[in-house]
Amino acid sequence: MPAPIFLCVLGVVAAVSQANILDTAKASGCAKLVSIIEDAGLTSALANSPCATLFAPSDAAIAAIPADVYSMLSSNRTLLQEVLKFHALPSKTMAADLQNDQLLATFSSGTKLRTNIYNGGKVVTAQGSRVIKADLPASNGVVHVIDRLIYPVPALNLPLVLTFDKDLSSLGYLLYQANLISNFSEQSFTVFAPNNPAIAKIPGQEYNDLLMNFTELTSVLSLHVVRGTVFSAGLTDGQKVKSLQGGTLDIHVSTDGVTVNGAKVLQTDLSATNGVIYVIDTLLFPPKMMTSGKTFMAPINVFECKVHKNKRRVDHVLAVTCLQQPAVTPLGSGMGSCPTLLRSATLSSQLSLHDSNCQCDTPSVLVIKQQRPSSMPTAKLTKGLAITP
């Protein structure tokens, strides 16, 4: 009769399987991983660990590693060790113990592996890699087989990835301009990130207007961000997710790839320490925001209300609203009166408000609702005004 082998469970030893986590992995279709672990000199550390969980890439997953990545890992033993140690936890964690957006300490010092649960528990991922076999028992822990190698190991948060990635640095700059670096450094987010060519497609004047309008810029950027980490394994065709801006993002998945509000996803599952990034080919705008005749909103402090030098009156302005105040002051036809908000205003090719005695509370947003006949020039954004057709 073979001697019993012991497994730790919450500090208690119990007699179960004779195979350690590496033996179990090898017998479960992960022999290539075990061979790489041996070459990296980690066999003893993992096989002799009293309690461990191994997320083991299958043989097919190892075979799918791009040649340049495989070559780099093979030639850099330190990097290889850190990547392999990121796949192992110094504790026994069964599939039923995993939670959505859970961060688990790994054998790689200071790093945490993210697990996610999708589709009512039918899909479980480890740093975006799908678990295809779960809860394979071992004498010193448990093995979960995954469908791809976790690489690269996430080391930077979302703003830093966007700033230092050579293809995403323009978006990182916009985050900085919108003062959103600290906001997007929190846990946990999914970012649909337009690459540098996507942002370069914005016409120069529209890009400048975007930079000058803090609220508009914040709204645009927030449309690209979803709370919670959604790796590609959790995406489904026809899925609708709510962005931080409040608008809905329509996800479509097909054999041709993934689109988000019509923008093509160029790269999926770029991991950060506080979420995941999808690279897309187009900058998204909220439905009501356009570059001419659309809605613009921005913080303002003080606006004057003198008649513009060309004497054209605001005959087609319907209402002026200070959003931090409940009042909406109808102007009707002609100059009208606005005792609490505006005394007069004018409209030419640009809307311009002047005179220090007309103001909204600080900070606030001024929205001008306008009915524009076809013969009237399109109003353009000036000093953070909001023009609503």
Image (spheres, helix red, strand yellow):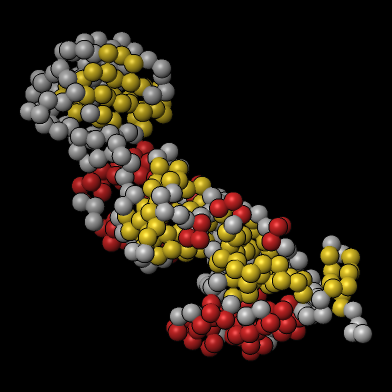
Residue 145 at x, y = what percent? Answer: 63, 72
Give the image quarter of residue 318.
Answer: top left
Residue 60: x %, y % from top left: 53, 79
Residue in the foreground of this view, choosing between 338 and 132: 132
Residue ID at (33%, 21%): 321
Quarter of the image that includes the N terminus: bottom right
Q: Residue at 51% of width from left, 51% of height from top?
A: 189
Q: Which image quadrant: the C terminus? A: top left
Location of residue 8 in the rendering, given as x and y in whole percent from the top left corner: 84, 69
Q: Is residue 288 left or right of residue 161?
A: left
Q: Is residue 155 visible?
A: no
Residue at 20% across, 34% down: 293
Position of residue 54 relative to residue 340, above or below, is below
Q: Quadrant of residue 373?
A: top left
Q: Give x and y (percent) for residue 106.
A: 68, 68
Q: Is residue 301 visible?
A: yes
> Where 113 sits versus 1, above or below?
above
- The residue positioned 47% from the left and 48% from the top of the image is 226
Up the image or down, 111 lies above or below 75; here it is above
Q: Which of 321/182 is in front?
A: 321
